[in-house]
Amino acid sequence: MPKSSAGNNQGFAYQALLGTTSKQTIGFLVEVLDEGDSTESYLFESKLKGYVGWRWSVTVYAPEGQEPTVSEVLLMPGVDSLVAPDWVPWSERLADYKALQAELEAQAALDAEEAEESDDSDEADDVDEAEDADALALAEEQDEAAEVSAEDEEASVSNDSGDEPSLAVADLEEGENAKGNAEKARRKPPRFLRRRKRGAKNKSED
């Protein structure tokens, strides 16, 4: 709507506004709008608390040759006013709510499926790790058994090689002892001859 200058009806509009609200809530004249058909809207600044940027609007009908009359008085938001969001029918809000719930359920199902797959993957990894650990333990046991077997064989060979010289020495010593005993036995006369010799010796001394 085109903007026009304030006519002689500005004071009339202001007085009409005082019949609706107090003087403290009315500010300066902001603009006048030509509504057509001898009708104009006078916009005054609003000083009501909580209505920053709002305007008082007084619409005056003033045909030529007639007294002006007030069509309406109202409080309307300005360009920078804080206003409530546009009204949305219940059917549309319900449809939006159902769509949101369906989306949330689908997302929850997807999250549950991913969590299940993750658990299965973790279990498979645990099984693989357990199998690897068992295989490693078995290999270590086999290595230890092989080392023990090798040590036993070395000890057995060492004992066998060490006992043979000992046995040979023992046999040699036994042979030498037997030979010495035999020589001693040959050197000594029989016991009855030694007795006779001692008896004959005693008689000769007598």
Image (cartoon, grey):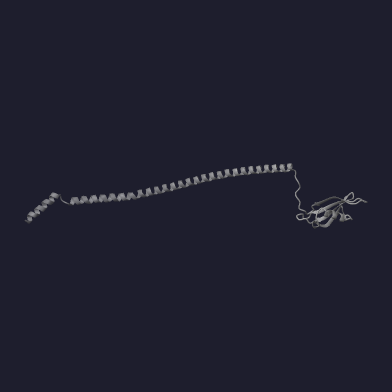
| Direction from residue 115 to residue 142 in the image, left or right | left
| Direction from residue 9 to residue 24 in the image, left or right | left
| Direction from residue 113 to residue 10 in the image, left or right | right
Using the image as rendered, state which of residue 119 and residue 51 is in the foreground.
51
Residue 114: percent from the left, percent from the top?
61, 44
Using the image as rendered, state which of residue 76 and residue 22 is in the foreground.
22
Residue 39: percent from the left, percent from the top?
88, 50
Q: Quadrant of residue 22?
A: bottom right
Residue 7: percent from the left, percent from the top?
89, 55
| Direction from residue 113 to residue 194 in the image, left or right | left
Q: Quadrant of residue 50?
A: bottom right
Using the image as rendered, state which of residue 193 and residue 1 is in the foreground.
1
Q: Residue pushed farthest left? A: 206
Residue 67: percent from the left, percent from the top?
90, 51
Q: Residue at x 19, y 50 (%)?
A: 185
Q: Residue at x 24, y 51 (%)?
A: 177
Q: Which of the image's four quarters has the C terminus? A: bottom left
Q: Residue at x 7, y 55 (%)?
A: 204
